[in-house]
Amino acid sequence: MEILVIRHGQSQADLEDRHEGRADFPLTELGMRQASLLAEWCRVNYPPELIISSPMKRTSATAQLLSEATGSPLEWEPDLVEWNNGLLAGLTRAEAQARFPRPAGGRKPHDTYAETESLIDFRARAERFWSRFTHGYILPGRYKRIALVSHGGMINLLFRCFLALPVVSDINFVTGDTGVHLWLVEQGRKTVVFTNRLDHLRGLD
């Protein structure tokens, strides 16, 4: 089975240099154009049979455009929402640094400073989704291709789940606005076919 892993388009928080996370900003006009181009590209090249998406505004708008373009049913999945950044949500980066400076020596995996979700808890949430997804959807003959629409931080942790990387890792996976990754699970073998594909945005101003 193929798994398309997709990040949402540009959001208003991106323009304002704000901590987004659980702050529920909508897509910008550019973000909607990005998502429309993504949807058409997927329709032509990798149409999913099912879309599973975070229900936040920026992901839901992206997923709905993909669903409309491909005719694929859409399911909402709360565990795919972004990192819970607590009191940082919605603050500009300058405001956050002034009000909630990072702990001395950097953030530790167990830290919940500023009422944030710890890295350990964030990873556990990703693992919970991945376990349910693996046992409920990656079944012989059930689906050929499913799309997961989520956020940069969650996608990074889903990569770690997929590749069985440790909680603490110096390996990170970048995903641009509407970036697409393709994974393949076949006879117990897992393959990363491509990462952060942005072909659909060529020529976009």
Image (cartoon, rainbow, N blue to C red):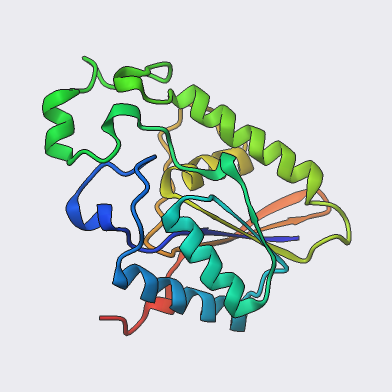
Q: Which residue lies furthest to the right in this view?
A: 141
Give the residue at x 44% y 71%. Answer: 35
Judged left or right of residue 159, residue 71 is right
Q: Quadrant of residue 79?
A: top right
Residue 137 placement (x, y as % from top left): 78, 51
Q: Quadrant of residue 146?
A: bottom right
**Up/down of 73 relative to 154, above or below:** below
Judged left or right of residue 107, residue 197 is right
Residue 165 placement (x, y as % from top left): 56, 34
Residue 18 placement (x, y as % from top left): 22, 45
**Up/down of 157 relative to 117, above or below:** below
Q: Quadrant of residue 73?
A: bottom right
Number of numbered discs visible in the structure rendering: 0
**Up/down of 22 relative to 186, above or below:** above
Query: Can residue 60 be seen here?
Result: yes
Judged left or right of residue 47, residue 205 is left
Give the residue at x 57% y 32%. Answer: 125
Camera-nearest residue between 32 and 105: 32
Give the residue at x 65% y 39%. Answer: 129
Camera-nearest residue between 124 and 161: 124
Query: Can residue 195 be seen here?
Result: no
Residue 28 placement (x, y as % from top left): 30, 66
Question: Considering the image in quadrants, where does the N terminus appear?
Answer: bottom right
Question: Considering the image in quadrants, where does the C terminus appear?
Answer: bottom left
